[in-house]
């Protein structure tokens, strides 16, 4: 019983620390939940300031591949985990998709997103393609062994990248309603990353890199939205075609593929 309490307290402290980082980030980027300057910012417009957070996370992730200091930090976290935790909690297999699900599901509760269903799907498709291809390329080239020794595709964390991609999208679509939608999305993303380490599937460095890739992928998805709408997926009236379609990429540990959606 004492061991379980110690483990719970240790895990709670880390979760609280991570949550504080999220709250600080949103406090910096949004002084008021419905601040007019926050609402008026168009995510499809490129801004160098948008690169600060994902750029910092990706930089840490890259440096962590060679830095003995960061390697020691990652190893220390996993060693502490091995000493105190025996049971796995695989909620990260589900929480990785929760932010994206909320991006679409909130419409059913009367909370309108900033962009239409079609535009959101275009952003999602572009973001997912960028994120999944980046993750798969890095996994196959970095060849980092997982903490549990099961394979050599630990870096970066695909689950974490997926979760943060969705969290950034949820933030962009609903920040005009309240900052708390973004806090919810990023809390789910942090939970996903935390449990990837908790379940001995990733090093801390893998999770940091995955978070940076996920956020940046969504930003790229929004930046490319005007091009995708005007050049790639024109409306039926513009093309004089009776149907339109969309191809969505997906990936897993077993491979990568495409799914098609056609509207008549």
Image: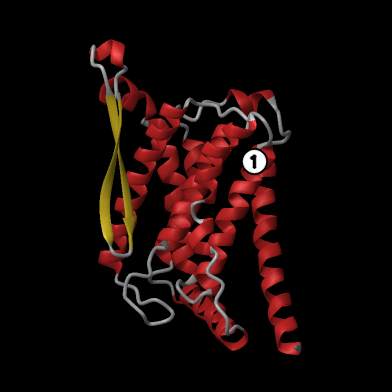
Q: Residue at x 29, y 19 (%)?
A: 234
Image position of 195 (left or right of 229): right
Q: Residue under circle 1?
A: 181
The N terminus, quarter of image = bottom right
Percent coordinates x, y for residue 229 in the rendering: 34, 23
Label total for image: 1
Percent coordinates x, y for residue 64 in the rendering: 43, 68
Disc 1 residue crowd, few under 14, some 14–19, many 20+, Cα 10 Å: many
Percent coordinates x, y for residue 91 in the rendering: 55, 64
Percent coordinates x, y for residue 261 in the rendering: 31, 35
Vertical comparison of 259 with 9: above or below: above
Between residues 168 and 118, which one lies in front from this camera angle?
Answer: 118
Q: Secondary structure at mark 1?
A: helix
User: Residue placed farthest to the front in the image?
Assistant: 264
Image position of 174 (left or right of 257): right
Between residues 72 and 135, which one lies in front from this camera angle?
Answer: 135
Q: Residue at x 24, y 14 (%)?
A: 239
């Amino acid at each position: 019983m004492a061991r379980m309490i110690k483990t719970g307290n240790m895990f709670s402290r880390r979760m609280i620390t991570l949550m504080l980082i999220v709250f600080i980030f949103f406090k910096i980027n949004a002084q008021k939940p419905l601040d007019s300057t926050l609402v008026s910012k168009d995510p499809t417009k490129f801004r160098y300031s948008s690169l600060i957070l994902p750029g910092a996370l990706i930089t840490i992730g890259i440096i962590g591949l060679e830095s003995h200091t960061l390697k020691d930090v990652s190893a220390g976290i996993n060693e502490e985990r091995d000493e105190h935790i025996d049971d796995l909690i695989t909620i990260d297999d589900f929480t990785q998709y929760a932010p994206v699900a909320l991006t679409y599901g909130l419409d059913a509760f009367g909370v309108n997103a900033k962009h239409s269903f079609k535009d959101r799907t275009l952003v999602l498709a572009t973001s997912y393609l960028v994120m999944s291809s980046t993750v798969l390329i890095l996994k196959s080239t970095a060849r980092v062994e997982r903490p549990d020794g099961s394979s050599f595709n630990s870096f970066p964390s695909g689950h974490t990248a997926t979760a943060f991609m969705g969290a950034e999208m949820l933030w962009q679509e609903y920040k005009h309603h309240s900052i708390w939608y973004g806090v919810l999305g990023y809390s789910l993303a942090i939970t996903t990353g935390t449990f990837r380490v908790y379940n001995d599937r990733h090093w801390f460095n893998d999770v940091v890199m995955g978070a940076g890739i996920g956020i940046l992928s969504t930003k790229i998805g929004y930046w490319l939205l005007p091009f995708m709408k005007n050049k790639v997926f024109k409306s039926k009236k513009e093309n004089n075609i009776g149907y339109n379609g969309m191809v969505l990429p997906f990936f897993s540990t077993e491979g990568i593929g495409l799914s098609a959606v056609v509207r008549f």
